[in-house]
Image (cartoon, rainbow, N blue to C red):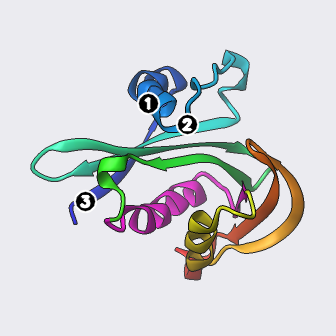
Amino acid sequence: MTQLIWESVDPSCFREKVADFYAEEFGRILPEMKRKDWIRWKHFLLWSVGSERALVGWHFGKSAGPDRFYLANTCILPAFRGQGIYQAAMPLLFRKLQKLGFRTVVSRHLAKNWTILHLKQKQGFRKTREDQPTAGGLGTEWSLALTESSR
């Protein structure tokens, strides 16, 4: 596998790179972000760096407290799925978030989304709360403490 790099970008750059992929993947447009909200939200592009640099995926999320980060949306582009990229990339993102001062990451998923729940469990996430709002309805919240063992 080639080297993976998460690049932190501002929302306008993120929108420029991701908007078309997002609409195709999720069937809706990428939400507009108000400038006053930029400080809470973090936007990352995932690049594969080998003989050429290629956009592989993205992540955006926000501060959910002084040391908690909410993983709002992560996507690996279809051409790169099934290659172990998600499993390889997330610990890199967790290290980046830890350097920004976050100690816990949380995400919410529908209970029937077995694919992502299985991946979260493999990463060490634990179910922490039921009946949490998600884009598709009520789901469960999963948390991971960012410690030496989780990276």
**Of all residues shown, which one is farthest toward the right?**
131
Q: Nearer the viewer, residue 88 or 145?
A: 88
> In which quadrant will I find the N terminus?
bottom left
Report the residue at 15% width, 53% height from top: 50
Horizontal placement of 133 versus 23: left or right? right
Tag 1 residue = 18
Q: Is residue 110 above or below residue 19?
A: below
> Residue 55, relative to residue 100: is it above or below?
above
Q: Position of residue 7 (x, y in %)?
A: 40, 42
Mark 3 and mark 2: Cα distance apart in space? 27 Å
What residue is rendered at 21% in x and 51% in y?
49
Q: Element at badge 1?
A: helix
Report the residue that reaches farthest toward the left.
51
Q: Is residue 6 left or right of residue 90?
A: left
**Identity of the residue furthest to the bottom in this view:** 149
Which residues make up the magenta segment?
83-109
Residue designated by label 3: 3
Residue 18, percent from left and from top: 43, 30
| Disc number for residue 26 | 2
In this rendering, is residue 150 above or below 28?
Answer: below
